[in-house]
Image (spheres, grey):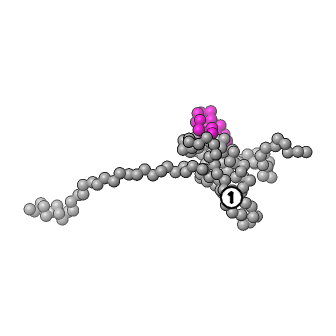
Amino acid sequence: MHRHGYKGRKFNRESDQRTALVKGLADSLIMHESIETTLPKAKEIVPYVEKLITKAKKGDLHNRRQIIGSLQTTSSAHKLVDDIAPKLGGRSSGHLRVVRTRMRRGDNAQLARVSFVDDLQEAPVAKAVTKQPSAKKPRQAAKEDKQ
């Protein structure tokens, strides 16, 4: 028996549990924009979310419905299409980064942080400082009225 043509990791789960796990991790990644999980799980969700980002960049109704079906909540799907995908427009691929962080204390499993490569926070807009005419203090106004 050989493993030729078998794609993906099993994570010691049934297929429906595995798809629920990947959907949940992708959903959390989109909602929180960064998650920490074990390294094999991190490596597994990166191509899954990359394909969703590619669909979200197109943004038409068909792709939006496919994204909703691929994630657990519709709010995360709308956040991906409406908020995240426009900010990633300058990049054709490689939207996610996997960084090894630490070894978990209980079972010594390698943990990794998955996050977006581009900073998704909008740059703060510099507000123009305008000096408003200062209102006269009540004492000054009272003195001027007496004179």
Q: Residue furthest bottom?
A: 105
- State the residue at coordinates (67%, 50%): 25
**SS type, badge 1:** strand
Q: Is residue 76 visible?
A: yes
Q: In which quadrant will I find the C terminus?
A: bottom left
Q: Nearer the viewer, residue 97 or 82?
A: 97
Q: Is residue 68 visible?
A: no
Q: Residue furthest left?
A: 147
Give residue 140's quadrant in the image: bottom left
- State the residue at coordinates (62%, 35%): 63
Q: Is residue 62 magenta?
A: yes
- State the residue at coordinates (76%, 64%): 107
Q: Amino acid at mark 1?
A: Arg
Residue 80 spot, x, y in % from top left: 58, 43
Q: Is residue 75 magenta?
A: no
Q: Which residue is mark 1?
A: 100
Residue 37 spot, x, y in % from top left: 69, 56
- State the residue at coordinates (91%, 45%): 1
Residue 143 spot, x, y in % from top left: 13, 64
